[in-house]
Amino acid sequence: MSAIPVHEFIASQERKGLLRFITCGSVDDGKSTLIGRLLHDSQKILEDHMAAVRADSQRWGTTGGEVDLALLVDGLQAEREQGITIDVAYRYFDTDRRKFIIADTPGHEQYTRNMATGASTADLAIVLVDAARGVQVQTRRHSFIVSLLGLRHVIVAVNKMDLVDFDAVRFKEISDEAQAFLRSLGVKNAQVIPVSALRGDNVVTRSDAMPWYKGPPLLEVLETVDVTQDRGEDLRFPVQYVNRPNAEFRGYSGTIVSGKVRVGDPIMALPYRHASTVKSIVTYDGDLEEAGAPLAVTITLADEIDITRGDMLVHPDRAPSVGKQFDAHILWMAEQPLLPGKPYDIKIGNHYVRGTIEQIEYRVDVNDLSRHGAEELKLNEIGVCRVVLNQPVAYDVYDSSRETGSFIVLDRLNHATAGAGMIRRSSAVRTAGHAGNAVVHEHKISRAQRANQKSQRPCILWLTGLSGAGKSTIANALEQELFRRGHHSYLLDGDNVRHGLNRDLDFSDAGRVENIRRIGEVAQLFVDAGLIVVTAFISPFRSDRRLVRDLSAAGDFIEVYVSTPLDVCEERDPKGLYARARRGQIGNFTGISSPYEAPEGAEIELDTSRQSVEECVAAVVRYLEETGRLKS
Amino acid sequence: MTSRLLTHLDELEAESIYIFREVVAEFENPVMLYSIGKDSSVLLHLALKAFFPGKLPFPVLHIDTTWKFKEMIEFRDRRAKELGLNLLVHSNQEGLQKGVTPFTHGSSKYTDIMKTEALKQALSKYGYDAAFGGARRDEEKSRAKERVFSFRDANHRWDPRNQRPELWHLYNGRINKGESIRVFPLSNWTELDVWMYIHREKIPVVPLYFAKPRPIVHRDGMMLMVDDDRLPLKAGEKPELEQVRFRTLGCYPLTGAQKSDAKTLEDVIAEMLESRTSERQGRAIDHDQAGSMEKKKREGYF
């Protein structure tokens, strides 16, 4: 039998607490080795796992055939083959005092996203620093993500002390620099420990090689750090599920995120502020008088009020913010960039809400914390953003409550988890202007926002060519194709311009120039509104087309030369205009009595004497796709 | 009853209950996979807690290879009756007709046909959009990376390189038609946690977990229990009664017993304290080839 009687062991197990932590560092820092060492030295490596590691060390190991403890940690086959880890892996071990859950995240390009994922549920972070290399850019990056995700406890493990001869001076240099940097990020209680994961110094047991270090070894800190104060004290109970097994019972099931709830407590249901009192706290094991975080319970109320999943029960005097707008840090995790104005699904609390990122205030460079203007956030980028929802929700700022201050952003097409958000502050407070120096924000919708909402980059497709060349036919077919694909366009042609806006103009050269100028200006307004504008005018003069091109932002003016030859146009003569012009009944007729100046360097050329309408439309759409005008 | 000091088991329990409720609130047609083992017993217990005083709001599905231990089937039917479960049992009829057994087709192919294929058949047949499983991340290396909400495409496949990030407790339950989610409420439990919880909550488990004299033959380094006369005995093999128990349960021709005197739950826990081998060692299917579990999971195995 074991050294201690089994009933004592069971009793100790039933008193044990739980600590979740994350390890941050790259392969080179010896992160996997440190985890392997913790598992190994706390006697949690099972014999068959160890035998597999011995075999794998011969095959994949980086330690020259020695047992490579890092292989205990690296999981998937693909990763073993590449010698790298690619995702978040969870490891479990326990000591007599605590059960530990380690989130292990890999150290290359997907790092920011994976580390944030691991950190989101962790109580504590171990930031690894290579003693030989000191505080590096990546140390700063890890520290920033740790602070962003709101971890209150940080251990800096200065690893590979054996490579610097266990030098106390070198350790102090690194320790001072790391501490100063963490303090600047608002991380107050960082503890710095000199270790050698490879040899096991100061990991589980105190090292003989560093008598100058008087602090505890790593595992001791993990076993004793106090995380009970990390949750807030205000009651937060997001309603997860309405439990109605029969007509007599109506309970609200959920997990107490923070604080405590007692029978008889006055309660308010947010966001609609329905008030009641707690009638009972129901569990499978019997009703409770009082329950606290993080228990999962079912609450019944004294009054019949309308509460659904996504509502939050709180104490009326300690309520969180309620609103549709807030500012948040957003970490983007999808290949398709975050676009302001584009509709997303946002899961906050227990429900999904439609919303948009109205504006990216700035992007933060994770390596040096510098701020930059941004029109979009790419994969692994972090920005401060204004979020606008289409219905009010109850929320806290992330710093005071991780569970009620966080949200995820979902792509509405493939439902991927595309972003993770941490609420910084309510933007309603700022716009209300009662905070003295509050800045009132201009709610101007930018061109980019409008365009992103429509999944397209607006532009002008300027069709030019002789009368009868096929401009209107192509323009109409093109608009129908764009509409079918879900894009937003508008067609300007003689029919809708000449009879209204330009009805005061004649067909003199001056009138024709003014005609084109006005069309150009109107087209610009539609482009600002986010539309793809198609125009179909003969517009025979180079200088006029040049004028419209100059009005447009670079690349927005796309000249489409419909180059159908004169003889073909004249033969078609759909309105009998050529015949009348030939007879001299119409003056200044382009191609007959007035010149047509063919474009030089039009972006697209179409000839309806050789191409079908469908081929012409396809050529234009292809051009738009290739130049990134149309987004799926 | 008043609140007491919270332990790691309380936290694990609360997290699992939360996961159950999220799925039932978000999905139209969830199902719980029930494999009759200790993890399934804990899973079922947690589900009952999550929806109390309501009944279990989803059916319980057992994929029956027809090679389970007799005591497992007896236990399954007894518990289903006691708890009033909506129990569905599915076997791969095509596989049965073709005479697929662990002996004729090898453990790998047999598992693929009678477990993975059978599971996919059942999930497709009933159109489940979410399926609870009792897998734990500490069981096996590839499981360590599995999400709590694990996305599967329309062919039930898992893509370990393209998993949805899972932050906080904001599980993403959004899927397109035909896609599904496998859900693992016990993700953060260890084998020891499971036994400690069974002890604390007095959860019934199959008697095969406790030591008793059973008819055993030794084969390829495994102790196999001769559960019925379908096990083809090789030359020189003669079943003899040995005091054994099982650490995990599956198909009897593929599940190794271990010598043990642990007749009670306390004995089992005491034995585990001294144990230095992991529980899946007794399973032939994990050892077929390097990364074998990952391969099976990609193909749709639980």
Image (cartoon, rainbow, N blue to C red):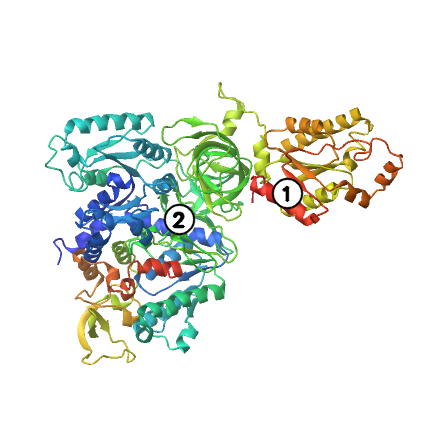
- What label does residue A620 carry, if any? 1
Q: Position of residue A227 (x, y in %)?
A: 29, 38
Query: Going by the image, does A307 lie left or right of A1?
Result: right
- Name the outermost residue toward the top: A436
In front: mark 1 or mark 2? 1
Q: Are marks 1 and 2 in contact (CB under 8 Å)?
A: no
Q: Secondary structure at mark 1?
A: helix
A345 in relation to A214, above or below: below
**For the C terminus of chain A, which image quadrant?**
top right
Report the chain holding disc 1.
A
B113 in relation to B146, above or below: below
The residue lying at 43 percent from left, 52 percent from top is B21
Query: Camera-side residue: A474 or A163?
Result: A474
Q: Quadrant of residue A607?
A: top right
| Residue type beneath disc 1 | Val
Query: Going by the image, does A360 lie left or right of A503?
Result: left
Q: Position of residue A339 (x, y in %)?
A: 52, 37
Query: Camera-side residue: A619 or B171?
Result: A619
Query: Going by the image, does A412 lie left or right of B230?
Result: right
Whether residue A250 is visible here, answered yes or no, is: no
**For the N terminus of chain A, which image quadrant?**
bottom left
- What label does residue A297 carry, if any? 2
